[in-house]
Image (spheres, helix red, strand yellow):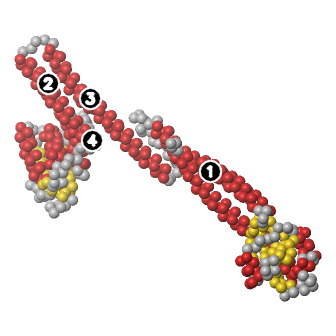
Amino acid sequence: MIRLGYRARLAAGHAIVLAVTLGLSVVVLDWTVRRIILDQFDAALLHAAQSVGAEIDEEGPTSPVEALSTKPVRRLLWTFRPIIQVVDARGGIVTLLGSHVPLQLDPPQLKKVMGRGKIAFQTVTTADSKLLRVAALRASHGGQAYAVEVAHPLDDIELVLQRIRWLLAAATLAILIAIVATDLALTRQVLRPIDAIVRQARRLNDASLAEPLPHPGEPGELARLVETLNAMLARIHDSVEAQRRFTADAAHELRSPLTRLRTEIEVTLRRPRDAAEYRATLATTLEEIERLGAVAESLLILARLDAGEGRAAVTGTHRLSTIVEAIVGRFEPLATSRGLALRIAPHATDALVEAAPGIVDVVVGNVLDNAVKFSPPGGTIDVDITGTPYEICVTVSDMGPGIPEDELPRVFQRFFRGKSPRAMGASGVGLGLAIAQTLVQRQRGAIDIDSKPGSGTTVTIRLPAVSDGS
């Protein structure tokens, strides 16, 4: 089965609709022209019949036969060449001129003429299969009623109508061809921008996703389609670029520990060493392995988030203060070992959140881990919970060195570790805040950072609140 393209289907559809419309118009026009010509022909026949009837009605001639021998009737026979037949009340033929084949008017028509004096028109077929148009009216002579029938062959009219039909058919075909050709040209012109879009789209690859599809230049449906496609391509390009950077950063983060492991082991194996040196090498190796494990675990979490698995199943509403208190309690031993005071302020809100406890644990845990990691000994980390009927906030403030202003917009980027003193001594992989932000956004929340060098850092986690009656 041949499948036509959109352009061919559009042209074919227009052609079919146009052909049907023109065909119906031609049929109506043919019927109208035929009716007009036949009416004019009937008027001529009626005029001839009235002329003959007037001669019969004259009292001068002794019979209808003599009346048909008058000069007006002979002139009519010479110019119009009709068939004239006069019949009496019984249907008998009184006289017949112009043909040797009698006219056969239907009895009901003849009765209408003779009985009620009506004028009748009828198309009859003669014995030799000729079509005749007949006009009949009543005349009287010497007290006797007669039917005057004047007929004429329809050959000339049919010839004229046939020529008109051929002319209409030729004109219709010419109009159809012209309109279809114009339609194809206009369709080609209209679809030309789409062809350009298709050509450009076929050339797209990872390296050319940033090239926008050609804009048609005029507002309209096609322009909106192109703008939508370009916006989609831009998002795809950004996603591909982010994935490419993520892959490169991940490879770098994995390569560095592996390189250090290899170097450490190669140096250790160059000569025999005592147990203490081997123990030190194994301790360093264990640290690198733990770092590799942290990188792998973070990458796995991000991969699941990117695959849409970050929307953890909600197991109901939970009191946020209870979850945060448990997290703070888990971090207190670590903070104490580093000489830090980890405090949670008395909270005036017991608002509920509709989020899985595991998600809140990861988000708040990552923020607290950074606060403990970057706070100097003797510092204080404050955790506060505030809220409104619509939003509940968890604020974590530390007394660390702060984040430079130029690095602040990038702290949520994956694998970002700044060059500030705060970051230089960090042992993380630069994925904690990226994971936290992604999880919070999946819960229709937000996470903000306010920090200045030398003034510490404050991280605010905002989550939608749920009322107790919901």
On residue 316, the disc is: none
Image point 77% across, 82% down: which residue? 114
Q: Is residue 367 left or right of residue 204?
A: left
Q: Which residue is mark 1?
A: 180
Where is residue 441 shown, x and y percent of the image?
25, 48
Tell me which label, 4 or 1, sits earlier in the chain.
1
CA separation in Å, label 4 and label 2? 33 Å
Secondary structure category for the residue under label 1? helix
CA separation in Å, label 3 and label 4? 22 Å
CA separation in Å, label 1 and label 2? 80 Å
Find out whether the residues at labels 3 and 4 contact each other: C-beta distance under 8 Å: no
| Residue furthest to the top | 271
Q: Which residue is mark 3?
A: 252
Q: Which residue is mark 2?
A: 285
Relative vertical location of residue 115 with respect to residue 223 in this rendering, above or below: below
Residue type for callout 4: Ala
| Residue furthest to the bottom | 143
Image point 72% across, 68% down: which residue? 35
Find out whether the residues at labels 1 and 3 contact each other: C-beta distance under 8 Å: no
Relative vertical location of residue 453 with respect to residue 171 in this rendering, above or below: above
Secondary structure category for the residue under label 3? helix
CA separation in Å, label 1 and label 3? 63 Å
Where is residue 16 shown, x and y percent of the image?
58, 53
Q: Which residue is mark 4?
A: 307
Dividing the picture into quadrants, the one containing residue 86 is bottom right
Residue type for callout 1: Val
Dot 4: within a 10 Å radius of its alpha carbon, few (fewer than 14), some, or many (20 or more) residues?
few
Residue type for callout 3: His
